[in-house]
Amino acid sequence: MKISARNSLEGVVKTVIKGATTAHVEIELTGGAIVTASITNEAVDDLKLAVGSKAFAVIKSSDVMVAVA
Amino acid sequence: MKISARNSLEGVVKTVIKGATTAHVEIELTGGAIVTASITNEAVDDLKLAVGSKAFAVIKSSDVMVAVA
Amino acid sequence: MKISARNSLEGVVKTVIKGATTAHVEIELTGGAIVTASITNEAVDDLKLAVGSKAFAVIKSSDVMVAVA
Amino acid sequence: MKISARNSLEGVVKTVIKGATTAHVEIELTGGAIVTASITNEAVDDLKLAVGSKAFAVIKSSDVMVAVA
Amino acid sequence: MKISARNSLEGVVKTVIKGATTAHVEIELTGGAIVTASITNEAVDDLKLAVGSKAFAVIKSSDVMVAVA
Amino acid sequence: MKISARNSLEGVVKTVIKGATTAHVEIELTGGAIVTASITNEAVDDLKLAVGSKAFAVIKSSDVMVAVA
């Protein structure tokens, strides 16, 4: 599958914390930065996400803001 | 200002393309990955974004998806 | 690629309108409903989207609202 | 009320799962597809959503991605 | 129509700027603050938005961030 | 830090409700309207949000819809 979302950042799953319905997944990018994703528990199960899994953080461009110091 | 968005990825502005109302800004992260942001032209002016500017890609966790190969 | 976004609605591209930086793509779902996506011109080119292409409208659950009449 | 969101897909509520603060609601569209919405528990109560309720999945165009197989 | 989005802020349209595909609409809230919405040109036409129109800025809770000074 | 998000609405935190992973924070704007934000529990802790805190509701323009009565 190829998706229109312009951002697909490669990394490794560092933590998976499931809540009642919503899970938080941290992905450590190849460059060292950490990206946190808030996704459904069902998605965690469906993708079999676990610490150490290779994964991509996928983000639509219209959801990215820019900040300057 | 400190913001609730969990993701703030440091980098350098690589391209700025203004459209009629919406601009596309590419930020090259420290780790080498490129993040594209779709923001208003006004924000580009207000933040004085230009090629070579230090900048952060800021993303709310609920806007991050996870994909596996 | 398998993605955490829970919604992937199958259909056929009905219209593609490119703007200066942002394109509007209409997908006619199998059930007859029309879904409009606002994506980058680059994504349209990259996915080679054209009228008649088979395509999926992909939506993160946290971006879906519910309304009642 | 008329809203700018371009996508309003008609269906029937199939499941409602409340979490600690966030609920997941599945709507079965007229065409048979299932759409999952992640909304607040308060919204579920406020709209009196229950299995069998007629409902619309409402989505802003800028939150719709496109994928091809 | 009643919608799950928790935020509906009343005001008056102050400016409407159409781009190639995407319009920017400024709404002056009753309390004096200005909210900018980036919506499709089609939505502007469909809702007949014009300077002086009464309008609401509608925002899903999961799209609201919090910042402190 | 200066951010591209066009909307930053000043107010005071009225309620903070933590869930398993996701918190709901209500901000009462200067003009009297209430804005609800759905953010991570971690962000609540990190920003030390509590009832009575001065805070801003920050929203990207592409996440604002417009409605008319």
Image (cartoon, coloured by chain):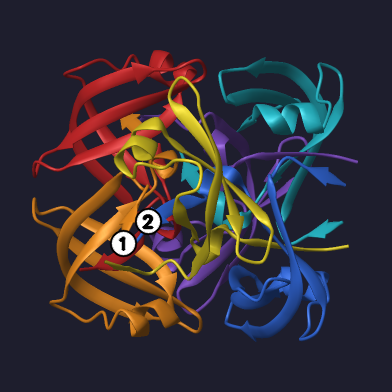
Chain colours: A red, B orange, C purple, D cyan, E blue, F yellow
- Is residue D31 visible to the viewer in this orientation of the structure? no
> How far across and down, in percent of the image, does residue A52 sit?
16, 19
> How far across and down, in percent of the image, does residue E59 sit?
63, 53
Please tell me the numbered disc located at residue E41: none
**Residue shown at 43% from the left, 44% from the top:** B63
Q: Are marks 2 and 1 on the same chain?
A: no
Badge 2: residue crowd in 10 Å (few <14, some 14–19, many ≥20): some
Q: Is residue E3 left or right of residue A17?
A: right
Badge 1 marks a residue whose secondary structure is: loop
Q: Are marks 2 and 1 in contact (CB under 8 Å)?
A: yes
Please tell me the numbered disc located at residue E68: 2
Among the 4 quarters of the image, the one containing residue A45: top left
Q: Is residue F48 left or right of residue E26?
A: left
Q: Is residue D58 left or right of residue B48?
A: right
Please tell me the numbered disc located at residue B1: 1
**Residue shown at 31% from the left, 27% from the top:** A25
Say if C18 sits above or below F12 in the image.
Answer: below
Q: Quadrant of the N terminus of chain B?
A: bottom left
**Residue shown at 39% from the left, 18% from the top:** A44
> How far across and down, in percent of the image, does residue B52 sit?
12, 77
Badge 1: residue crowd in 10 Å (few <14, some 14–19, many ≥20): few
Q: Looking at this view, is E42 or A25 the one in front?
A: A25
